[in-house]
Image (tube, grey):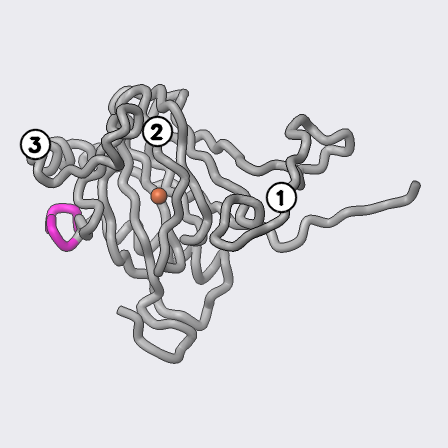
Amino acid sequence: MEWNSKGLFATPLIRISINDIEWVKDFFYQNIHSNEETATKNSNNATVAKLKHYHSFENVFTLYDGLEPLRKKIEEAGTFAYQSLLNYTHSGPMKITNAWFNLCNVGGSQIKHSHANNLLSGTLYLHTDQHSNIEFYHPLTTDSLHAELYDEPDYSPNDYGLKYHLREIKIPVNTGDCLFWPSQLRHGYKNNLTPQRLSLSFNMMPSQLNTTYQTI
Ligand SMILES: [Fe+2]
C-alpha cells in the first residue's frame, strides 16, 4: 500500500535558557516565601495542597522592584519567541501581564489547566532535579465545553513511528529553562518527585496587537 502522512499545524513549545538566576531563588526565599499571606493553595485536596502559589492573582514584577532584571530577560526572550520564532512580526514587544511563584513539595500535582486572556504563557524553572517535568495535553482531544464524539486510541507506539495518537506529552525541565507556549494549551504535572520544586509562571501579551491597537 502506498501512503504518506503529514502532521499539520504543529503546536509550539519553545525553550530559551535564562542564565544567572540563582539570585531569583534567594530573592523568593528572603522576600516572598517568608510571608505566608501571599500564598494560595490550588485546593484543599491533600495531594494538590502540596503545591503553593505565591501572588498567583498578581504580578510579582510590579510588587517587587528587585525582580526588575528578571522581567527584562523574560520579556526579551518572549519577544524573540513571539516575533522571530512564531512570526508575529507586526505586533509590539511582549510584556508580562501577571507572574507568580510556584513551590511544590514531593507528592504534589498541578491539575490540568490553561491560561485564558493572554497570547503567550510560560514558566521559568528555578529549582529542579532529574525528576522534574511538565506535561502538555493535546489541544484537540482534551476535554472541552461542548459535546464531542470521543474515541480512545491505543497509546502504545505506532508501528509506523507516527505520533498522532498521543494525548499527553511529558517534557523534562531543568533549572534555567524558560518555556513558552500558546496560552490556551493545557498543561500540568502529576506526583512531583522534586523536593522544593520552584518555578515562576507568567502570562504575556504584545504591547501592541497587529499594528492596530494598544493592549497594555
Ligand atoms: Fe499554568
Q: Which of marks 1 and 3 is nearer the N terminus?
A: 3
Residue 150 is labelled as 1
- Secondary structure at badge 1 equals loop
Magenta stretch: give its range. 62-68
* Residue under the point 7% across and 32% down: 34
Q: For mark 2, what is the residue?
A: 109
Q: Does the magenta stretch include residue 119?
A: no
Q: Nearer the viewer, residue 210 or 192?
A: 192
Residue 29 position within the rendered picture, expressed as x and y whole percent measured from the top left: 13, 31
Instruction: Classify the position of the N terminus by image quarter.
Output: top right
Where ligand 1 lies, by quadrant?
Answer: top left
Badge 1, how many Cα within 10 Å: few under 14, some, many 20+? few
Res 104 visible? no
Q: How many labels does the image show?
A: 3
Q: In this view, does 152 lie to the left or right of 43?
A: right
In this view, the mark in front (3 or 2) = 2
> Outermost residue toward the bottom?
212
Q: In this view, does 155 lie to the left or right of 132?
A: right
